[in-house]
Amino acid sequence: MDEGDIVSKKLVEERKFYNVYDEKWLSHWEDKPADDTIDITAARNKDGDYIGNVEMARILCDRHGIAPECREPGVTCAFGWSEEKQKYYGWSHRALVGFSVGNKVFDAGCDADLPFIKRGKVDIKNKDDARLAAMNFAEYIG
C-alpha cells in the first residue's frame, strides 16, 4: 500500500528511536466495499519510515539500542546503528546480525559455511564499512 492509502494515523507512543501509531488504511480486497478500513498498529522510525510491528521495534530499538534506517523512502527499515554496541545491524524477520570494525563486509557470494560476520573479502575498517555490511546482509536475508 502507498502512503496515500492511509485514512488516518494517530500517534500512540513516542520512544527513543521510534514511534508507535494506530493507522487506519483503506481496504483493497475485492470482497470489501471501497471505503472499508483496516486498523493496524505500526512502528515507524523518527523519519516516518516503516519498521514493522511494535514487537519487532521493541526488540530492535529497546533491547538492542538500534536506530532503524531504510535504504530508500517507502522501503521497510532493515538496518540501523547501535551507538551503545558500536555496531551496524542488518535484519529481517528471519535473522539479526551486528557488524563492527574487524568483521568482514558481508558478501553473500562467499563461503556459506562461515559465520555471517566473517563472510566477505574486505575487512570492516570504519562505521561506513559496517553500514555497507549491514545493508548487504539485510538485502540477502530479506
Image (cartoon, helix red, strand yellow):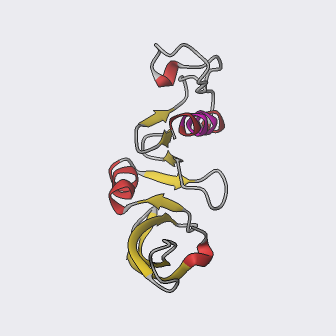
- Regarding residue 14, the answer to whether it shows in the image is no
Span colored in magenta: 130-137
Quarter of the rendering occupied by the N terminus: bottom right
* Label tally: 0
In the depicted view, which residue is nearer to us: 102 or 138? 138
Question: Left or right of 126: which side holds 64?
Answer: left
Q: Is residue 75 magenta?
A: no
Which residue corresponds to the image point at 48% horizontal and 71% vertical from the top-left? Answer: 29
- Regarding residue 106, the answer to whether it shows in the image is yes
Q: Position of residue 101 (x, y in %)?
A: 55, 28
Q: Where is residue 42 in the image (x, y as percent from the top left)?
A: 42, 67
Which corner quadrant of the image does residue 110 belong to?
top right
Which residue corresponds to the image point at 60% horizontal and 19% vertical from the top-left? Answer: 120
Which corner quadrant of the image does residue 31 belong to?
bottom left
Q: Is residue 61 above or below residue 92?
A: below
In the depicted view, which residue is nearer to us: 47 or 41? 41
Q: Is residue 136 magenta?
A: yes
In the depicted view, which residue is nearer to us: 132 or 109? 109
Question: Left or right of 118: which side holds 12?
Answer: left
Q: Where is residue 25 in the image (x, y as percent from the top left)?
A: 48, 77
Q: In this view, does 7 lie above or below 111?
A: below
Q: Is residue 92 above or below residue 118?
A: below
Q: Is the magenta stretch mostly helix, strand or loop?
A: helix
Q: Where is residue 138 in the image (x, y as percent from the top left)?
A: 54, 39
Question: Left or right of 127: which side holds 92?
Answer: left
Which residue corresponds to the image point at 42% horizontal and 45% vertical from the top-left? Answer: 84
Which residue corresponds to the image point at 46% horizontal and 61% vertical from the top-left? Answer: 17
